[in-house]
Amino acid sequence: MNTIDLSVPDWARRTAENLLATHGEGPHVVVTGISPSGNIHVGNLREVLVAEAIVNALKARGSEVRFVFHADTIDPLRKIAPGIPADFESYIGHSLSRVPDPEGCHVSYAEHFLSPFEEALKRMEMEVEVLRSHELYEGGFYAEVTREALDRTEDLRNILQEVSGRKMPEHWSPYLPRAGSGQLTGARILEHLPEERRVIFADEDGWEEVADYSKGEGKLGWRVELAARWKALRVTFEPFGKDHTSRGGSTDTADRMAREVFRYPAPGRYEYEWIQIKGKGAMSSSKGIVLLPGDMLDIMPPDALRRMVLGRDPARALDLDLAEGFPRFMDEYRADTEETPVPFAHLVTVAQTVAGDPDRAAGMLGRGGYVEAASNSEKLRRDLVYARNWAEEWAPESYRFGVCEETPLEAADLDAGQRSYLAAVAGKLEDGMDGDAVQNLLYSTAVELGLKPKAAFGGVYMVLLGKKSGPKAGPFVAGLDAGFVRERFLDVSGDTTL
Ligand SMILES: [Zn+2]
C-alpha cells in the first residue's frame, strides 16, 4: 500500500478510501457525464473536478484508474437554451449531435457547447478521456446493454414505477428509437428482434419503422441509460449533483436497475452542491446565468481555478466571488504556492499602468521591492494578463484606472493647498525611488504643509488618473517615470505658486 498523498484534500481521500473498501483495489473507472444542451458552465466543471480529485486520490493509493468524461451528445434537445433562435423549436426531441450549430461554427449543436468546455479541460491539462455518446451508440458499444434492457422491459418499468411512484405509460420502453423525422420521443415499440439488434416501432404518426440499435439509430431512455452505461463502461465511481440524488431521483432508479436487471453493482458516489455567482444566483444554463471555465482561466491559473471551484468541501454550496473578494483569494492562493508573491491588487495596478509592456512592468515591480517577480519574465507576463483581464471584466470600479496622457480637466478643481503640495513633492521626487520611499515622501510632505492626507493623496490621483482615489499611491507613483510625474505635478501647480 502506498503512503497517503497529503496534497489530496481530506474529503477526496475519505471518499477514495470508502470506495476502495466497498469496490476493491481496482482497476477503477471514474466517470462524469454532462449533456451539452447549452453552455457547460463552472457548476458542471465542479462535477468534473470532484471526479478528478477522486482519480488523484485513488492513484495516490496505487490504484489503476480510467477517467472518462461522457458527453451525452445523443441526448434529445429538450429546451431551447437562451439566445438560440426560436425556430430551433422544431429540433426538440432530436439528438444534440444531429441538430445544427445555432451559430454555424461547429458540426452540431452538441459540439458548439462541448468544444469550449473540452478546450478548457485541455488548458487545465486534465488527463481525461472525452467520449461522445452518439459515437459510442453508433459504434455498437451500447448494443449489448440495450438488448438486455429491451428483454427486461417489464422489470425496468416496475422499478421506475416503484421508485418514482409514477405510473408509466402502457407502451413505455427503455429504448427510444429515432423516427425518420429525427424524433427520439413518441414512438411505440412493436417488436424486438434481438438476433438482428433491431426494433420495429410505430412512429408518432403511427407509421411502422425499423431501428438498428447497434448503429445508434436510437438510445436508451436517460434513467435506464445511466445504469446501462455503468455496466458497459465498468464504472466504479460517479459524482452527482443533488438534483439526481434526491429520493426517487435518477440515481435511486439506476441503482436498482443496475443491481436487479444488469447484475452490476452501483458505483461509489459523491454528492456535490451547486455553485452560485455572487450577486447573480445559482448557475443555470437554462436561466442564462453562466460562467464558463474559459472565463475563469482568463483571470487565474488552472490550479487556482481548481481550488476556487472545489472550495473547501464540494458537498457544500459555494458562492464564487470574482469581484470584490477576488484579490484576497488570489493572495491566499499565491501565499500557498509562491515564495514571495506580489499582492494581486498591485499586479492589477502594474497591469493598468504599463499596459502591455513587460519591461516597464518589471521595472515598476523592481522599484516596488518585488525583485524576484520582476526577474521571472515569463511568469510575470502571464500574471499581468490575468490581472489585466480581471481589471477589464470583473474588477469593482475602485480598482479600475488608466493614467491620463495629458493633464485631466478635473485637475482644474484642485485647491491652492493641493497645488502647492504637488509642487513640493515634485521638488523632492527622485529617479529610482522605491514604493516605500515615495509613500513616505507623499505622506511626510502632506504633514509638513499641514494638508490632510486625504486631500494630498486625492490631488495625486486627480492629476494622474482624473479620479479622487486610486491604488496605493507610493508603489503606483514609483512605477511611473519620475520625470513624467514631476512635470505633471508642476504643470498644475504652476499657475498658483508665485
Ligand atoms: Zn459553434
Image (tube, rainbow, N blue to C red):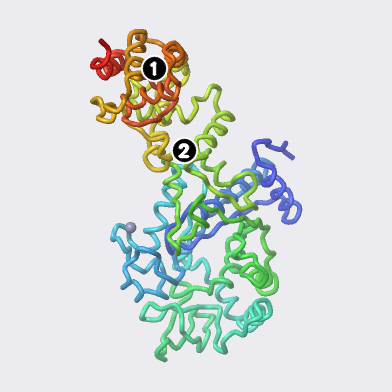
Residue 254 relative to residue 300: left or right: right
- Give the residue drawn at x 53%, y 84%: 192
- Residue indicated by mark 1: 478
Residue 51 seen anywhere in this rendered image of the structure: no
Q: In whole angstroms, how far apart are the C-alphas of marks 1 and 2?
A: 26 Å
Q: Quadrant of ligand 1?
A: bottom left
- Secondary element at tag 1: helix
Where residue 239 appears, as percent x and y from the top left, is: 61, 57
State how many labels appear. 2
Q: Is residue 243 above or below residue 421?
A: below
User: Contact, CB < 8 Å: mark 1 with mark 2?
Assistant: no
Residue closest to the eye, 113 or 318: 318
Task: Please identify the quarter of the rendering in which residue 162 is found.
Answer: bottom right
Q: Point out the tag, 1 or 2, that comes first from the N-terminus.
A: 2
Residue 14 relative to residue 445: left or right: right
Residue 101 relative to residue 243: left or right: left
- Give the residue drawn at x 42%, y 39%: 395
Q: Amino acid type of disc 1?
A: Ala
Residue closest to the eye, 318 or 241: 318
The yes-or-no answer for disc 2 within 8 Å of ligand 1 is: no
- Residue indicated by mark 2: 300
Where residue 238 appears, as percent x and y from the top left, is: 62, 57
Q: Is residue 232 above or below residue 56?
A: below
- Secondary element at tag 2: loop
Q: Quadrant of the N terminus?
A: top right
